[in-house]
Structures are given as structure tokens and as C-alpha cells.
Amino acid sequence: MARGAGVLHLPGQALALQPGQLVLLPPGPVLGWALAAGCRGEVVCFLADYYLTSFPAPGLPVGPGPWALVLPPAERAEVPALLRGLARTLAEPAADPAQARAYLHLLLALAFPAAPAPQGGRGAAVARQFAQLLEAHFRTLHAVRDYAARLHLSPDHLCACCRQHLGRPARQLIGARVLAEARHLLGTTGLSVAEVGYALGFEEASHFGRFFRQHAGCSPRAYRQNPALYQKNLENDQLPGRPGG
């Protein structure tokens, strides 16, 4: 962000924004922006495959994200020229992908000197791997055992790693992510309640209704009919309830 302040609302958290800040977001939905008057900043979108290929571990920040830092003055001064170069390259009729990737590489590299190396041993690595799997599969996998099998762990071991390094057991993290996406789809799309449930892996609309009512405290239909509930969730960043499965 070049100037001004605001709040970026993501599933499970609200991130305060300030001048000179560089924010790296993982794949996933942005639920909303609340920006003060006069804010100025730039957003650059790119594929996760590029990031994973260009910045291999251990320097690569991984896990639930996002990652944010306020750049020192010297690095901050470099950002406008890099953004202008990237925009100019992409606007050319015969855009050179290699040149665009070079500008993006330089922008991302600004963050890495301040990014801590992964810590916490095997348990922290398991938690990071789980967070990545969850973001990729929460629409179809709702049970802890499904994620544990992919990580070659017992469900209890996975829950313990998540509780220690992500603050909640895997069961709660799965449910919170599914609920966040359900609220997002109900609040911002024209999908029917049944279609939202199907999109999130519920075979029956009634199963989705029970899940939502248990964790959100009201039915999906009631939630959709009260826009104030969606706005309240954005402002308070609440992810109540426990996951099913």
C-alpha cells in the first residue's frame, strides 16, 4: 500500500493495512476491503505454480498466510519503478512473459529478507502441509482422517500438530474453512442454498443446512435474507463452530 489505511477481510481473519506494507496472499477468496478515503495501492495477481517454481523452500513462506511486512525505506522506494515496469510489459501487444516474470520475481524477493525461515521441526512442517491441503481440498474433504491419510499420519497426531502450531485442532480448522466459504457464497453469489451445499461437497441440501445451522447459529436461508449478518461477520471476523466429519 502506497498511502492510507484499511482492513483486508479474509476467511478467518482481518488484516490491517498501512502505508509501505507489502502483503502476500495465499490462494483463496478475499471476502472484502474496507479502505479509508484517499487510499492508494496496487494489486498484482499471479498463479501459485509460478510462485512455487520460482521460490523453492526453505525460503518460501508456506502455511495458512497471509504474510505482511512494512518495507524499509530503501526497499519501499524500489516498488513503484518495479510496478511500472511490470504494468508496461503486460500492456505491450507482444508481451514478453519472461520479462514480466522477472519484474514479479524482483517484487516478491523484496519480502524474503524479512521472512523468517520455517521453524518448529516436523510438527510445524506437518501443520504447514495440512494448511496447504486444506485450501486445496476443503470443498470435497471434510474429515480429519482424509487429510491424515494424505500426510501418512494418524488423525490424532495431525490434530495435535495443528493445535500446537495453528492454534486449533484440525477438526475445527476444517469446519471453519468450510463455514467461511459457505458464508461467502451465500452473501455474494446468486447460487441457491442447495447449490452452495453441493459446491462445498455436501451430498444433500439437508446435510448442508444442518452443518450451517449448527456452526453459524441460523439457517442458510435466514443468513442470506439478513445482509447485516454478512457485514457483521466481515467486521468481527468470527468463525464459530466445530467442523463436522
Image (spheres, helix red, strand yellow):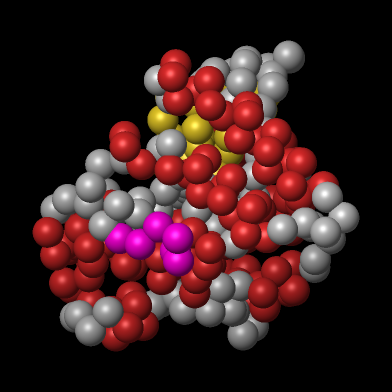
In the image as oriented, which residue stretches furthest toward the left?
Answer: 121
In the rendered structure, the answer to whether residue 154 lies left or right of residue 94 reads left
Magenta-colored span = 52-57
Q: Is residue 150 magenta?
A: no
- Residue 11 higher or lower than 194, as above or below: above
Q: Nearer the viewer, residue 98 or 211?
A: 98
Q: Which image quarter holds the C terminus?
A: bottom left
190 in relation to 78, above or below? below
What's the residue at 33%, 67% (across, down)? Answer: 130
**Residue drawn at point x = 44 percent, y = 16 percent:** 73
Q: Quadrant of residue 213?
A: bottom right
Q: Position of residue 69 (x, y in %)?
A: 41, 30
Image quadrant occupied by the N terminus: top right
In the image, taking residue 235 as reference, residue 227 lies left or right, namely right
> Where residue 82 sits in the image (x, y, percent)?
61, 35
Residue 32 in sight from this viewpoint: no
Q: How far from the left and from the top, in percent, is residue 139?
A: 56, 73
Residue found farthest to the right:
93
Q: Closer to the camera, 74 or 130? A: 74
Q: Nearer the viewer, residue 105 or 71?
A: 105
Residue at horizontal 41 percent and vertical 71 percent from the top? 133
Q: Looking at the picture, does residue 183 appear above or below residue 67?
A: below
Does 241 sit left or right of 184 as displayed?
left
- Above or below 202: residue 91: above
Q: Position of residue 202 (x, y in %)?
A: 59, 79
Give the side of residue 137 with respect to residue 97, left or right.
left
Give the tally of numbered discs: 0
Q: Which residue is depicted at the point 34% across and 78% down?
A: 147
Asked whether 53 falls inside the magenta stretch, the response is yes
From this viewpoint, is residue 192 visible?
Answer: yes
Give the quadrant of residue 32.
top right
